[in-house]
Image: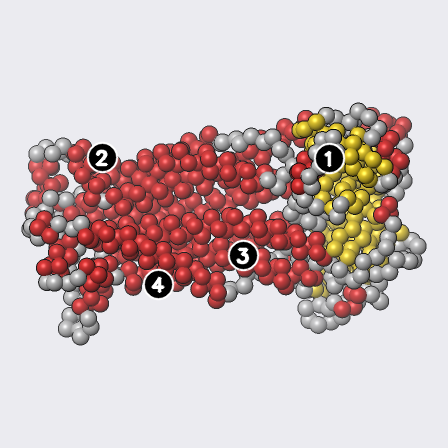
Amino acid sequence: MTLQKKIARSVGKNLSFYLTGSILTAITIMLLVGAFAVSHSIYECFTPYFDETRVEDASFVTMTEIPEEEREVLEKAYDVTLERQQYTDLDYDGTRLRLFAATEKLDLYTVSEGRKIEAADDIVVTYRYAKANHIAVGDTLHLAGRDFQVCGLGMKPDYAIMLYDLSESAADKEGFGIGIIGKDAMESLGGTVFYSVRYKDQSLEKDFRKTVYEKYQTIEYLERSANSRISLMYREADGLSAEFSLYCPIIMIVVIAVIAMVLARTVRREGKTIGTLMALGYRKSELIRHYMAYGMIPAVAGDILGVLFCIPFSRMFCGFFFGDAEYIAYEVKIPWGLLAVALLLPLVVYGLVSYLVLCGVLKVEIIPLLKGIHQEKTSRILNGSQAKLGVIYNIRTVCVNRFRSITLVIGIAVATLCIVLGGAFQDAYADLLENKVPYAMLGGQYEYGFNTYQSDGNPYGGDAVFDVSFGAKADDSRFNLIGFDDENQFADLCSEDGEPLSGKKYYMTSAAAARYGIAAGDTFCFYNTVTLEETEVVIDGIVKNDILSLVLTGKENAAAILERPADEYNVIISREKLAIPGELLKKSSSLQDYRNMVEHLSSTAGIVLKLLKVLGVCICILIVVMICGMITEESSRNISMLEILGYRDREVRSFVLSSGHLLVPVGFVIGVPLGYLTAYSMVLASAQSSGMRMSLPVRAETILAAFVFVLVAYILALALSGRKIHRVDMAESLKNVEE
């Protein structure tokens, strides 16, 4: 029998091991390549698109309009491209449609269906909104008292993610869209004026911003990096790559443990064969190479399966993520370099593990090998015990085969981790929706943001406040400063120590405090995103609000920071819907919008969470089937003896395969806290990127559901393994011969 024939025979005997190792390796490659394919595709598709359409570096709003001739002066003086833009919000058939004037220099719209604007009554509508609301090229839209002809469906690059307001973190493709019309048509409608800028020399940005602020009183300045409509896809792609880079090593650890166990077991059981081969002249190095092939089979087979399935999996994954973007004609970009590394990594790692295991096992000299280094392991545990024979047998099986038992525990723990992780995140989103979203407007139901600061004494109702975005000096992230009057709904709020809010003090929400590591009494440094002027304040208390990153203070304090009169305001928060002229507003939102956003996030994440649960179930089944296969092979003589003694098939299966009953609960108990710890780390990462502080409730229903998943997978695996017992050859098993 040649060594090559031995490999073929060994594969047949340990088929469950090779299938388990190969499938888990393939899953690792699919997850890793799929995640990075999404990231790679987003960068490769959006980056050149943004360059071609000359997407803005920043946008800003001023109190005083900048005349065209002065814009030209600024362009030459500071080497920038500057363009005036204008928009207005309209209601269309129960949805929100934001009309923009077509631009010529920056944020150039593109058309994927139909043609560009040629006539005064032409309009281009964003593609996904049009499809969701059954709008087609050639349709007529009645907007603001006039008819517009839909000439094309397309996209506006600075709205790559369709967010009505930048406080949102989920696209609303059905309820919010963009319409692009000619400049003349836009001027007749009026609306909000702002400016887009693109820097040719970034070093002149500060000087440009200072000049604009001093001459035209900049109200708001938004960099591209802080504009979620442009940058959100990049952040999601980076987060996905980081998360899946964590999962993949965990799966590989399971496979490595399995390979080490199987190889050591195989060599020990074939001690006499190895001794004979060495006596015939085979060197240890040759035998190591031979047995290394056993450990390399999962790597090779896993690589083949990974290559076959990673491309369709990557396409499916990209379709899922690009589904939130307005970019239609995307192309899946497979990171071939990473794929090569992903294929090479199992070969190197599994090969190294195999080599180290074999070097340790094959230290025995020829004579002991010929006598047989594999000795049937026995145990005296529970000698003299009155316990049932099956119980004693299973306990001894667990204790004697420690490495196999540890491998099973690790596999069940990893499977449980995946299942619990999926359930824990679903609980986190449910808690967010139930307990945190109701406070997304500080007790209000509606929020109205004005184009400019108002000084009319608020004839509309509700609470008039300052609401201005600032940058945190610690990490350059954005938060909002709220300046309120003493007599308003904020009187309902209090600090965590129960003290009602005072307009003379500064408070920070718990979401912001967690993000910036601030406690009551600490100093917080931030800067004006318009003037870049820095301010330091002492945070007197923390307000319980995990969804908004805010600093709250009285209007006089806020006015001093903003250098504006204290009787002005730019936002109204109300418990009732208010009648405010639309031309005055930059935005209007409701608490329901927040609910819809979180529900969308939950449903979007649900696909990935379900994938985690499926992965956990697969790992459980594969590991149990493999371990049971080993137990069956090693217990073939015992199985034959039990059958001779008259035990029924059901009793034999229970006797031989029930050792897992002791180990599966151990793996589950270990996996549950590991799953929650992993979920907690991901929740913290999510809080850093989104600003929302998600809680991670530990619910008995989630743990019970995870137990049911593991139990069902375990029972299914036992059912599959039980079939192997029927195929045991009694005559062959009872031979006192070592192959």
Amino acid carrying mark 2 in the image: Arg
Amino acid carrying mark 1 in the image: Val
Mark 1 vs 2: CB contact within 8 A: no
Residue 676, disc? none
Total marks shown come to: 4
Please name the residue that numbered disc 3 is placed on.
Answer: 426
The answer to which of marks 3 and 4 sits earlier in the sequence is 3
The answer to which of marks 1 and 2 sits earlier in the sequence is 1
Looking at the rendered structure, the secondary structure element under dot 2 is helix
Where residue 53 sits: x, y (%)? 70, 28
Q: Which colour style is shown?
A: secondary structure
Please name the residue that numbered disc 1 is placed on.
Answer: 125
Residue 665, disc? 4
The answer to which of marks 2 and 3 sits earlier in the sequence is 2
Amino acid carrying mark 4 in the image: Pro
Looking at the rendered structure, the secondary structure element under dot 1 is strand
Say which of marks 1 and 2 sits in front. Answer: 1
